[in-house]
Amino acid sequence: QLVESGGGLVQPGGSLRLSCAASGFPFNSIDMSWVRQAPGKGFEWVSGISRTGTRPRYADSVKGRFTISRDNGKNSLYLHMINMKTEDTGVYYCALGIQPTLPPTSRGQGTNVTVSS
């Protein structure tokens, strides 16, 4: 099971930290990722990280602004977002795999992020 949290309303230029709590599978053996879906659009891969927490990868649209991390001791995945833009608005999901096929079949229920003034 994957449960995302931390979404909300933020102004352009602001920041948010998303969390994903994992359970029911060996979290420390699975690469993980964040994907998002903007209103009325398809899924977009945002970032991925290996099972050991190395080799983070980012979509060009978020590179330099988002940081993915994980804590295997807490079975948790994180996404720290800074300098946010209106185009970052959407539902954010954590998913299994470092860059899963979209839409990812193994994902949580999502957390809503709205970037607006």
Image: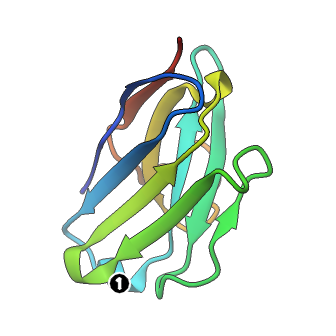
- Looking at the picture, which amino acid does disc 1 mark? Asn
Pinpoint residue 38: horizontal percent, then vertical percent. 59, 24
Pinpoint residue 94: horizontal percent, then vertical percent. 43, 52
Is residue 103 left or right of 108 when viewed as pictured? Answer: right
**Is 42 situated above or below 16?**
above
Quadrant holding the N terminus: bottom left
Q: Which residue is drawn at 51% across and 34% down?
A: 14
Marker count (numbered): 1
Q: Which residue is drawn at 50% across and 22% down?
A: 11
**Is 39 situated above or below 13?**
above
> Could you say which quadrant of the image residue 101 lies in?
bottom right
The residue that label 1 is drawn on is: 28
Is residue 35 left or right of 95 when viewed as pictured? Answer: right
Q: Which residue is drawn at 59% across and 32% down?
A: 13
Question: Can the viewer see residue 68 in this picture?
Answer: yes
Q: In this orientation, which residue lies closer to the viewer: 99 or 68?
A: 68
Q: SS class of the residue under badge 1?
A: helix
Pinpoint residue 106: horizontal percent, then vertical percent. 42, 54
**Is 93 situated above or below 76?**
above
Q: In this orientation, which residue lies closer to the viewer: 53 or 95?
A: 53
Give the farthest residue toward the front.
13
Is residue 44 left or right of 7 when viewed as pictured? Answer: right
